[in-house]
Each structure stands twice: as C-alpha cells, then as structure tokens.
Image: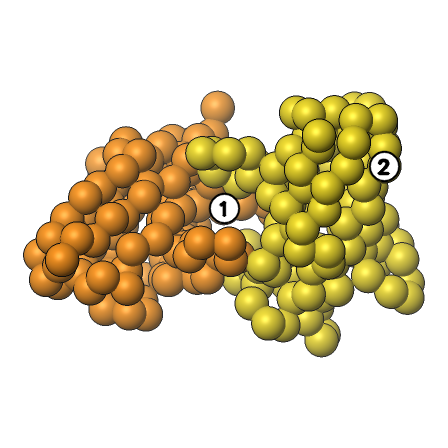
Amino acid sequence: NAGVMQNPRHLVRRRGQEARLRCSPMKGHSHVYWYRQLPEEGLKFMVYLQKENIIDESGMPKERFSAEFPKEGPSILRIQQVVRGDSAAYFCATGWDPSGANVLTFGAGSRLTVL
Amino acid sequence: AQSVTQLDSQVPVFEEAPVELRCNYSSSVSVYLFWYVQYPNQGLQLLLKYLSGSTLVKGINGFEAEFNKSQTSFHLRKPSVHISDTAEYFCAALMDTGRRALTFGSGTRLQVQP
C-alpha cells in the first residue's frame, strides 16, 4: 500500500463544510478509481478517472460530489456541504492499464467523520 | 444485476484450524475474481486472483481459492490459520462488460482465537 498515497488519513468536518481527499498514484499508474466504504459494508465504486478525463462516474452521487485527476498532481475527491451520511472511509486504487486483468493497488484510505 | 455475495459476515475459528470463506457471484458474462484482505485501519491487499486457466489459485499467506463456474463460486480456503490472519476479507469481481470497476462483496470478518 505504500505506493499509493492518500491524505489526509483522517478528516473531521462539520455539517455543511467541504472535504477534499487526495490520492497520489503509484509511479507509472495513470488510472485512478475511488471507492467508498460505509461502516460494516464492502467497498462501493464511485468513479474511474484517467489523466484529465472522467471515464466512469456511475457510482458518484449526483450532487455535492466531484472528482478530478489533473495532468499534474494528485487525484482529488471533493465533497461539498458534507452531511453525516458522508462519514465513511474513502479508498483510491490505481493501475497502469485499463484491461480486465488490471490488478489495482489500493491506498490506505481517508476516513471522513462528519460531526 | 451483477453482484458478489459473501454469505458469512463473521467467521470465528480457532488457531491452526482450517477455514473456508464463501463467495458467490452472479454474472452472465466472463468474470475475473479476486480476494482482498484488509487489516484494521489499512487499505486492501490482494491475496489472489483468478483470470483464466487452472481453477485452483494459490495466493499469499497460504491462502488458496477455487473457481467453480457451475456453482458460480470462488471460495477462499486456508488449511491452518494463525492469529495474524484475523482481518476482513473481501471477494471482488470484474465483469467482462467493458465496465472496469471491481464489484465487491460485503466482506467476511475472520476472527482467529487462540
């Protein structure tokens, strides 16, 4: 997991604030996936990005959530006007090719707590 | 709908005993299957994967899994567990539909007792 860096590891926000979660892929990886893990549940796919492109955002809530993966810098998952239901662990996973055999490397996650 | 089901939310077992964690998937298309382990407050680590070929797949830490197409199952096994195997285990599938995201099961908590 050391290769995929996520920060912050823990984030506390009050309702209505914004949360920004960052994911720096492993060297050579240009594909980024974001997943959300609610307490006592498995991981749910949110969005898949390549550099400067959103490929699949079918798992993203329609409002308040956005993601980007710019040409330079980390991928960012942004949650506006957070609510208590956004409290979860957010994981990013990165890979080097888009094929079905692509094995993803997961980061250690960012744990968001909304008060 | 494509889904991955882990029937057991928790599996308690004594140290050095064998264990099987069950996973079933539903898919009408070709599928790749994975098992991941998650230790407390950490990310997911790949245990093993099935892409094609031999249906018996060996992974790290002494784990193995068998792909059974007729049963649509991919159960994870270990002949003798250690205390250090206590963790959450997730089965995941990548369906050959062009959508590249993994579908995860809800997880099984393996608790190894001395």
- Please provide percent x and percent y for residue B2: 47, 30
- Dividing the picture into quadrants, the one containing residue B31 is top left
Disc 2 target residue: A18
Chain yellow in the figure, letter: A
- Taking A37 as reference, is A48 left or right? right
The answer, for residue B72, to whether it is visible in the render is: no
Pointer 1 with pointer 2, Cβ within 8 A: no
Going by the numbered disc 2, the residue's amino acid type is Glu
Q: Is residue B104 left or right of residue A38?
A: left
- Kindly identify the amino acid type of the residue bearing the numbered disc 1: Leu
Chain at numbered mark 1: B
Chain painted orange: B
In the depicted structure, whether residue A66 falls above or below residue B114: above
* Residues tagged by mark 1 and mark 2 found on one chain of the structure: no
Viewer-nearest of labels 1 and 2? 2
Q: Position of residue A7 (x, y in %)?
A: 73, 58
Q: Identify the residue at horizontal 73%, vertical 56% (top origin).
A: A8
The answer to whether residue B19 is above or below residue B45 is above
The residue sitting at 85% across, 48% down in the picture is: A68
Where is residue A63 shown, x and y percent of the image?
Answer: 82, 24
Rate crowding at label 1 as few (under 14), some (14 to 19) or many (20 or more) other CA atoms within 10 Å. Answer: many
Cα–Cα gap, marks 1 and 2: 32 Å
Q: In what element is the residue under mark 2? A: loop
For residue B94, the mark is 1
**Few, some or many C-alpha atoms within 10 Å of disc 2 (few <14, some 14-19, many ≥20)?**
some
The quarter holding residue A30 reads bottom right
